[in-house]
Image: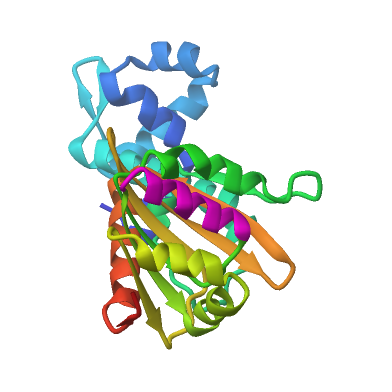
Amino acid sequence: MPPAKNHAGVVAKRQDVLAALETGMRKPELVDHLSLSRSTVDRAIDELQEASLVERDGSHYVTTYAGRESLAAYEGYLDRLDALAEAQPVLSALPPDVDVDPAALEGAQVVQSTPAAPEGPIEVNVDPVQRAETLRTTSPVVAPRYLEAVDNLIESGTDIELVYTEAAFEALSTTYESALKRVEAAADVHGFVTDRPIPYIVWTAEVPDGTISGLIVHDDTGLVGLINNDTEAMNEWARTEYERYRADAEQVY
């Protein structure tokens, strides 16, 4: 088998042939299936055999275990690149040292704020959040739309924890004093304040049909966008991030 670098190059170059040979084909069938010349197919088969990615079985050629796993790894790599590219407009507003697990982005819903619909991303979250039986969220930003959502959850008896930054809790205490009194009076709502900076809202909610989590990004101009997902990768990342801020925060109600 060639060195790993060359191996990766063979997989990338011959991805279509590898995919076609997962169920096995003769060379003439491969020519017709991929609309390639016979000489191109011959070269591809030679390269893949040399890399131990394809083997001959009678008159057919079929991928080896290494071939199947290499193809799956390469396709997963491409999917992750696509997910990063789609999420980049939202992630680009974060500080450069923020670490978001790329696996959490695969298959995620990405919604950007636009001049025509600056609150559009928040509206996307209305349904999953309002169905929440438990909600854990950081709160580096306090805004009327968020407070309204919390009020609705209080009425439905949702178990809520919020971890504020010092600045956000100060804003809640002074600008939204009546809202603070409502959450302080709610038996199922608990608030915490951390002296650490929180670069985004990260939240995770248990809903009747599972768990959904995400992050919401703001910058100095307002809401940038959100990224939501219900995969285990996103849920695990969001739980870990929330607990990281919750661990050393002081309970205030």
- Position of residue 52 relative to residue 175, above or below, is above
Answer yes or no: is residue 111 visible: no
Q: Going 50% across and 78% down the picture, which residue do you hit?
A: 169
Q: Is residue 90 shown left or right of residue 163?
A: right
Q: Position of residue 18 (x, y in %)?
A: 37, 31
Which of the image's four quarters has the C terminus? bottom left
Is residue 140 or residue 240 the one in the foreground? 140
Is residue 2 or residue 19 the one in the foreground? 19
Q: Going 57% across and 67% down the picture, which residue do you hit?
A: 142
Is residue 31 or residue 184 the one in the foreground? 184
Answer yes or no: is residue 32 visible: yes
Using the rendered view, name the quadrant where residue 251 is placed: bottom left
Q: Position of residue 199 (x, y in %)?
A: 52, 74
Q: Which residues are magenta?
A: 144-157
Residue 155 drawn in magenta: yes
- Position of residue 63 relative to residue 182, above or below, is above
Q: Position of residue 248 (x, y in %)?
A: 29, 84
Query: Mainly helix, strand or loop, the magenta region?
Result: helix
> Looking at this rendering, what residue extends furthest in the right direction?
116
Using the rendered view, name the quadrant where residue 159 is placed: bottom left
Q: Going 35% across and 79% down the picture, which residue do you hit?
A: 252
Q: Position of residue 156 (x, y in %)?
A: 35, 43
- Position of residue 82 relative to residue 242, above or below, is above
Q: Going 46% across and 46% down the picture, which residue do you hit?
A: 152
